[in-house]
Amino acid sequence: MKNFFKLTLLIFIFFSLFNKQAFCCTKIVVVNIAKIFDVIPQKKKITKKLEKELYSDFLVIKKMKKLYLSKIKKLENKNLSKKSRQNLEKEIKYEKKILTRKIKFYTKKNRQKQENARNKILIFIHKLINIIAKKKHYNIVLDISSIAYIQNVKDITNDVINLAIQQNNVLFI
């Protein structure tokens, strides 16, 4: 039995010596994804693009709201006949219903587009992190927001930001 354990231990040591990963020290680095998200120029480009896309819808809603408020103001006029007052009240109710639907639709559309843009930016950031990690042979990259305490670990946030700036012309939307 002693010989079996010795032989097993010897085989384990023999294979471990020739396996480079067995004695390789792990290279752990941290990255601040939130900081990268705020700083990279691609985010600013996407934000401007989203604003342009959603601006026309915003103008339509703004115009409808202005018309709606003007009809409410007209309703306050005491010189209106009973029939015209009733017609105006019906119009106001109808326009309020349409305006509410448009606002809900616009809000939903806006939220979806922002989420899609956010996800694309995060995917882009993760691709940049992978490029740097492979280039410099890092084994583990951790987001700094998920760590309570860490000491003497390299931070590659600025490397990722610099790579994003170098790839400024990359539009991924």
Image: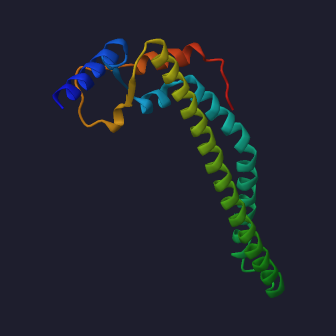
Q: How many marks?
A: 0
Q: How is the image coloured?
A: rainbow
- Which percent across, then down, holds residue 100? 68, 66
- Which percent across, then down, holds residue 148? 26, 37
Could you tell me which quadrant the C terminus lies in? top right
Determine whether, in the image, residue 115 is placed left or right of residue 135: right
Determine whether, in the image, residue 173 is placed left or right of residue 17: right
Rendered image quadrant of residue 140: top left
- Which percent across, then down, holds residue 86? 79, 84
Q: Which is more toward the observer, 9 or 22?
A: 9
- Which percent across, then down, holds residue 64? 75, 59
| Residue for point 70% across, 44% down | 54
Determine whether, in the image, residue 79 is placed left or right of residue 162: right
Judge whether 77 appears above or below 82 on screen: above
| Residue for point 54% across, 19% down | 164
Could you tell me which quadrant the N terminus lies in? top left
Residue 135 appearing in the image? yes
Judge whether 150 appears above or below 72 on screen: above
Rendered image quadrant of residue 80: bottom right
| Residue for point 32% across, 18% down | 16
Q: Residue furthest bottom?
A: 82
Rendered image quadrant of residue 170: top right
Judge whether 134 appears above or below 147 on screen: above
Q: Which is more toward the observer, 76 or 124?
A: 124
Judge whether 57 appears above or below 18 on screen: below
Residue 80 appearing in the image? no
Determine whether, in the image, residue 143 is placed left or right of residue 127: left
